Amino acid sequence: MQQPQAAVSGAAPPQDPPDSGGATTEAPPKQVALAMDRLARAARLIADIRLGADHLLEALFLAADGPHHSNKTIQIILKEEASMRQHFQDLRALGRQLEDSGVLNGSLKSRGNSWGLHMPLVCPDGAVVAYAWKRQLAGQAGASAVDRTRLALKAFTDQKRRFFPLLEDEPFGHSHDGEFGVAKKQKTSHGLPTSHREELNEVKTLSDILTDLENKVPNMKIFTYQRLDWLKRASLLSSSANENSIDPSKEQSMHNPNKLRSGSVNAVAVDKVAVIELLVPSVFRAVVSLHSAGSVNPDAAAFFSPDEGGNYVHSRGLSVHHVFRHVTEHADKALQYFLSVDANTSLSLLLRWIYSYQTLFTKVCSKCGHLLLMDKSLALLLPPVHRPYRQTCTTNFNQSHSTPSAKVQNVDLNSAYHIGCSDEV
Amino acid sequence: MPVKWLMHWQPHQGATLNSQILTEACQCVESQLGGAKDGRWKTALTFYRPMLRDASTPGDLPRDFLGIALHDHPGSYFFLLRAHRLILQADSSIQSLMEKLQSYKARVVLNFEGFQYRLGDFQVRVGKCGPSLSEALRGIMMEVEYLPLSSIEKSRQILEDFFDIWQDIVNRRHWPGHFILIETKFCRLWPSRPLYSSTYSGTICQVAWPN
């Protein structure tokens, strides 16, 4: 009990400069680490205080037993009182430090140069979110601490994979000594084939995936492009959008005949495919980019109106229309989810999920039964833009190390929800 | 081009048309639907009648046709020959040409004007209709456009829902009348823009001559 005290008082001077002047010169990751450290210490102090209160109660019981214990009791009480006072003082000092560093009120955004990191946030129910990634925190007030940290870890993993690809030892599809739960899952799942996963176990090539898909999506046209070719096409789209005719047969003839059609994929050119365009005529155009050309790793996806064109029409662009913007936002989350569950099947799952949006303007919400609904928080009239992407079997994460991910294909593609009607974050 | 639907105001039996409805409709769009005022719009409709110089007129000349200057196509002018189901698109300078030719004279000019609002992906125009030379109010109309889509079939449900939502709002207000949706039979052969102008002409006929 004396030890944490000593640790606090001993460690305090060198690590925590008395004023915030020292803290702002530290790099943001250090600030985050310090804040986490302080929070841990605060938790320990609070535990110590609780213990101290217990001891006091114990001493009182002892005194009640009989008067011959009185001396002992008095000593115990005095000792406890001194240590409790110390604990409270330490806690107060720590609290002030935390407040200064912006932890308790989440106000670090105003400090520039935070590298996109945010101070750990202490939520009103006492849970601590280590990495306050914006997406995870939005609408998470009711989620449990476990869900929050799981999602934060997943987002961190995915972002790391996206922006620091060199940190990965080997490309996806091979087992490797990754430190994350996802990588471990891949390892175990490769070693334990089940009947569910036999057709998914082999790593499919891009042309396989596209050919498979084409057979299942009668209304959707699939085109593949090299990266630069897509930019040319996007600019072509904008010039055609200004013309009068919306005759669909004319639009098809505009497609460069050299573009790959999935039905007749040229083996050589597949290596260079970096962009997949999915067009449901008159409903939407989705652009999916692959992380390295020819691979099966989806990188980003975005939705646009079929009439939109221009340089901003690419997998990381945003449509000018609200409805497609919200679908794109939802697609981001779906993509992260598919990648985290099983990177091998993420592309085919994503493409199939995108196909479910062909009913974007016709399918009513599965919860409220309406097509168009005024979203109160956004003040926009929107159709149901959310399509669920989670799989029906949710035991994946709870038993991530011991069980292979089961039933990866059972995504419910038949329901749709408005933003406000959806249960998901 | 995004699909547009038109509605016009039908006052109840015995109620008179007044511009109070217009201001209230604008208010509704702003407050209930969260629309942001985007500007003004104006469309002019002209009825042309032939100038007959001599008694022997050839029989196949059209007896009248309409000319429309649409608000969102400022450089073009459209002629509608309803009897022949023809639509002609021309440059807007054809109006001065018609005046010089003196073959057909503009008899009546109706102006449609009002405010336009932006509600997310919807664009709504509320306006009044009246002859250009007087301040008389002939009708009130409303136009809704869903910007992300340009297919008539795909946007039908969305616009129907919008119309339902709008009707709900109007019905709660107990105005002396209601908005009626202009039903149009779309001919598949016509490209969309001239369709819109012919829809307009249909509206005009219902609005200007309610009997």
Image (cartoon, helix red, strand yellow):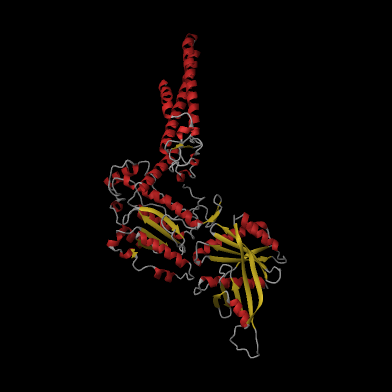
Above or below — where is B136 with respect to B26?
below
Where is residue A332 shown, x and y percent of the image?
A: 42, 51
Relative to residue A16, is residue B122 depicted above or below? below
User: Does residue A385 appear in the picture of this structure?
Assistant: no
User: In the rendered view of the protein, which quadrant contains the N terminus of chain A?
Assistant: top left
Kindly indicate the quadrant of the structure image that contains residue B128.
Answer: bottom right
| Left or right relative to A185: residue B24 | right
**In the displayed image of the protein, which residue is found farthest to the bottom?**
B56
* Left or right: A3 in relation to A74: left
B204 to the left or right of A416: right
Question: Between A424 and A272, which is closer to the camera in this rendering?
Answer: A272
Of the pair A399 and A271, the residue shown nearer to us = A271
Q: Residue at x 29, y 49 (%)?
A: A171
Q: Position of residue A424 (x, y in %)?
A: 46, 47
- The x and y percentages for residue A258 are 33, 67
Using the rendered view, name the quadrant where residue A208 is placed: bottom left
The residue depicted at 59 percent of the width and 79 percent of the height is: B97
Q: Nearer the viewer, residue B2 or B16?
A: B2
Residue B114 located left or right of residue A28 = right
